[in-house]
Image (tube, helix red, strand yellow):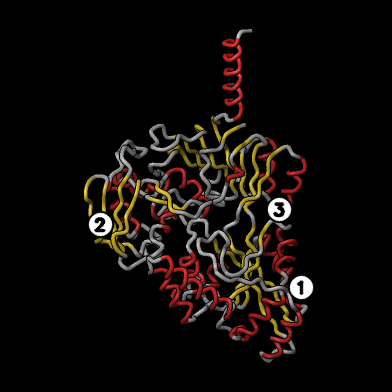
Amino acid sequence: MNVKKTLLVLTSLLVFAASCAAADLQTLNVGVPNDAKSMDPLKAVDTISFAVIKHINETLVTVDGRTKQLVPVLAERWETLDPLTYKFYLKKGVKFHNGEEFTADDVVFSFQRALSRESVYAKSKAKYIDPQGFQVIDRHTLIVKTLTPFGGFLESMKHPYASIFNRKAVADAGGNYFRMPVGTGPYKFRRWLKGDRVELEAFGDYHGDKPRSKRLNFLTMADDSSRVIALETGKADLIYNVPVNDFDRLAEEGRVKVVKGTGHNLIYLGMNTQKGALKDPRVRMAIEYAIDKEAFVQVVYQGKAVVPDGPLVPSSSFAPADSRRYPRDPAKARQLLKEAGYADGLTFDLWITTRQDYVNGATVLQSMLQDVGVKVNIIVMESGVFDDRVTTNTQSLFISTWGMQTNRDAGQFWLSLFHSSSIGTTNWAVLDDKVVDENIELGNRSVEPAERQAAFQKVWARLDEIHPFVSLAVPNELYGGRKNLRGIEEFCDGRLNYLGRLVIE
């Protein structure tokens, strides 16, 4: 064979090998543990709705899950003109799924809608936007102002509340928009069979890299074993929430792929700082010293979790300058209880929902606390009942979780958990502390990175001092996929990963 023919054969083989190495999918079926609640980003509050919405709607900017840096989406670039004023230069040639062109008017409409009565985020995430602070310079340039300085404004757009809508699409759908979404994203909505599936299809006019699967289906599979069987039998190409009890078995058998990803949800033992003996920080610290977090992680999550250093998820964009993990020290715990006047012990109710990891975790904590003279009565309730009762501030101890999938900013995370303004809503520790409040507010309103860092450092130190809860674990996200599915190893956004890059090897 001559050199020319040899090169031709080698080239053909390389092309063939490349095509075999990364083939597109006709349909990607994803098994998820819950059905979506709404396709409207301003009405959705659940993770699965957000997981679907991420593929339909886009924001001006977002935060890269791996680097924690701001990256452009619908805005090519932006400028901070002063602490209240942002200038956005929009990407040109972008189309909505209904064929309408994306312009600055859509941004104004979207932010105004986020502030309206239609939005569940009008008084929370969107409240910083100035309703009179818009100035359209041209079709692809505009000014957006905030009511007060908000250092995390751009970062907050990782959350779907900042999705950009098309005015005509919203008007045409009316009250049915929550099940007839239109966005600029890589996939467009096909249909939603409640309790069964949400079906999307690739948008041919997408402005970015084209998705690698023509269809994307989210299959509702609430039962853990059913979801695993669906993966093993090929009904699902990818599943979220692989049960910890199945993870090692699936890995050993090798018929499918299982992957541990970064977790973004903090599991914690909350303590009502305004009730009975728990008012005394020495009692709260005694409970901290009574708990072996490493053992908790091993028993409850079979080691598929990390122990956090404090009241924050490691994926946060803020990292404290100093942090320390409290080891289990029963003698120290008993000494603190004695100093607080409870040498003979205490009894608390521990509220939990029916989540299996909470049930298992409560049993572990009950045993550890019993060892230092703290008796725990475990009270299990349905999640809806739990959510209602914790807002009455009558709880003593409780196990719950708070996440950072949609926002990596510590100020917003702590605002919900610890600011006094959140008492009666999400501040279930009923913490009312001047130092915490002032520095959360300072960190949230400052646009200077160094000032924000200093404020958050003070919050961290104060929370460590007064100890409103015990940080127990950050569980890994556990994914399962077809043996030849490539790309899930790169997941870094919990259950809100973009799935359009997945390919078959």
Q: CA distance from mark 2 to mark 1?
A: 57 Å
Q: Which residue is under mark 3?
A: 244
Compared with 162, 27 (above or below) is above
User: Residue 195 appears at what percent x and percent y?
Assistant: 55, 46
Q: Could you tell which of marks 2 and 1 lies nearer the N-terminus?
A: 2
Which image quarter: residue 227?
top right
Quarter of the view holding residue 333: bottom right
Decide which of tag 3 and tag 1 comes sooner along the chain.
Answer: 3
Q: Residue at x 57, y 25 (%)?
A: 19
Q: Can you say whether 353 is above or below 39 in the image?
A: below
Q: Quote the CA–CA distance across marks 3 and 2.
A: 49 Å
Determine the residue located farthest toward the front in the rendered image.
3
User: Spatial distance from mark 3 to mark 1, Cα to Cα?
Assistant: 22 Å
Residue that badge 2 annotates: 134
Report if the CB atoms under discs 3 and 1 are less than 8 Å apart. Answer: no
Q: Earlier in the sequence, mark 3 or mark 2?
A: 2
Circle 1 SS class: helix
**For the N terminus, which image quadrant?**
top right
Residue 424, position as x, y percentages in the image: 48, 74
Q: Which residue is mark 1?
A: 367
Rendered image: mark on residue 500: none
Which residue is more in the foreground, 93 or 39?
93
32 is higher (above) or lower (below) than 309: above
- Whole-percent x, y for residue 447 in the image: 37, 65
In this rendering, the label closer to the viewer, 3 or 2: 2
Look at 57% across and 18% down and name the residue there: 11
Given this view, does label 2 or label 1 mark the residue nearer the observer?
A: 2
Q: Quadrant of the C terminus?
A: top right
Residue 111 x/y as whole percent: 32, 55
